[in-house]
Image (cartoon, coloured by chain):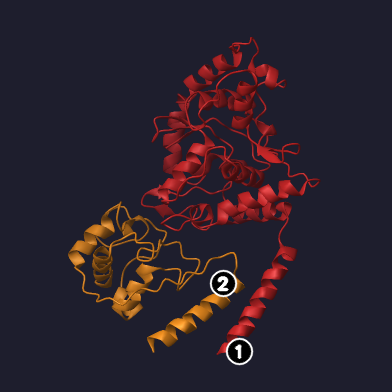
Chain colours: A red, B orange
Amino acid sequence: MRNTIAMLAVAGVVCTLATPLLAATPQEDQADFQAYFKARFPNVPEQEFGNGSYAIDPIGRENWEAIEEFPPYETSIDNGHEMWDTPFANGKTYQDCFPDGPAVENQYPRWDKDRGMVVTLPLAINECREANGEEPLPYLKGDIAELLAYMTFESRGQVTNVEIPDDDPRALEAYEKGKQVWFARRGQFNFSCASCHAANSGTTLRTEILSPGYGHTTHFPVYRSKWGEMGTLHRRYSGCFKQVRAKPYEPQGEEFRDLEYFMTYMNNGLELNGPGARK
Amino acid sequence: MRTRIRQTGALAATAAALITLSTPITWADMPEMELNGNAEAGKEIAMDRSKGNCIACHLIVGGESPGAIGPALIAIAPRFQTKEAVAKQVWDATVRNPEAVMPPFGKHEILTEQEFKDVVEYVWSL
């Protein structure tokens, strides 16, 4: 008995040591990830994955299309536009921080080599504000979601194109950390993101259809009927964590930024179609 | 006897942990308990969103709007043979299948011991 266990242990260590050598590159992960969902939902045209469960649920889609006729996020786009145009107390504007204008969503999240971290668009917005002597905005909802709604709307039609530069191993590390957050089981309910949004995507939790993980990042911020208002991607992350009875990470903290980096990279090639409306 | 089982268990757990360093193997055994719950009370827990919420993932005859993530809860006795086997599944489904997504209702104390016994009694009756 002891011998067998010792052998098992040795074999285990050998396997474990060998694993890093066999680890997939981000490119391979991305190909596997996208192929998985395309095989699981063979009738869904690729760009439709950006519409979440409405790509696979005809009844939900009908309601959603009706909602989209008078989009509940429209006021937020207008408010966000006004924020964009309104100078800070020092006379500068967001345009001074984002010289390419508001349509820059496809530039985020991106790896900042100087700081060795993932920079998301909401983070860049708050850093712009602080650099100009303004208070940072809370990250989950409110003003930041409205400004994001405007910038995202202006970015519609751009294509997700996250880069993981190979000249900085820390970028790969951040990607791997984000991947770990997506696949690790957590909380009292012991779910990972993948538990619901990969192997069980398309099935039903009660009457709710679980959306495929492919496409999740294309349409944020969203107006969610359940919230009755706009919310950011990290607000949705927090909600998911609470639903599985796990303590959410800090919005725009390292873990959620890395998760966004991984998830958005998985969606490379999908059109940006935010802001969105969701149930 | 009990001690020997525990030791073997611990050794096996160590070996398993070495094999899959990244996937934590659970080894919180179901404690010995008398499975004498109340099926009626268990049914309420099974349908209650904040408690067992079995209906969220499993078809249960007579339950409204069941989910479809897990298998239908029918013909339980012939499939599981013993009530204890059902209890172990509800306690922590990842023991039998590490990929199972079912929350470990016993091991993570999602249900109290009485609620757990009641649910087991109900599921066993299906």
Q: Taking A222 as reference, is B87 left or right? A: left
Q: Quadrant of residue B91?
A: bottom left
Q: Secondary structure at mark 1?
A: helix
Q: Residue at x 60, y 67 (%)?
A: B21
Q: Residue at x 25, y 75 (%)?
A: B35
- Check if mark 1's residue and mark 2's residue have beta carbons within 8 Å: no
Q: Disc 2 designates what residue?
A: B17
Q: Amino acid at mark 1?
A: Asn
Could you say which is closer to the camera, residue A159 or residue A133?
A: A133
Q: Amino acid at mark 2?
A: Ala
Q: Residue at x 57, y 88 (%)?
A: A2
Q: CA distance from mark 1 to mark 2?
A: 17 Å
* Outermost residue toward the front in this view: B3
Disc 1 sits on a residue from what chain? A
Q: Residue at x 44, y 42 (%)?
A: A239
Instruction: Estimate the x, y position of residue B11 in percent, counting from the top left.
Output: 52, 80
Instruction: Estimate the x, y position of residue A277 in percent, counting from the top left.
Output: 47, 32
Task: Using the image, tell me which numbered label, if any, was put on residue A106.
Answer: none
Q: Disc 1 designates what residue?
A: A3
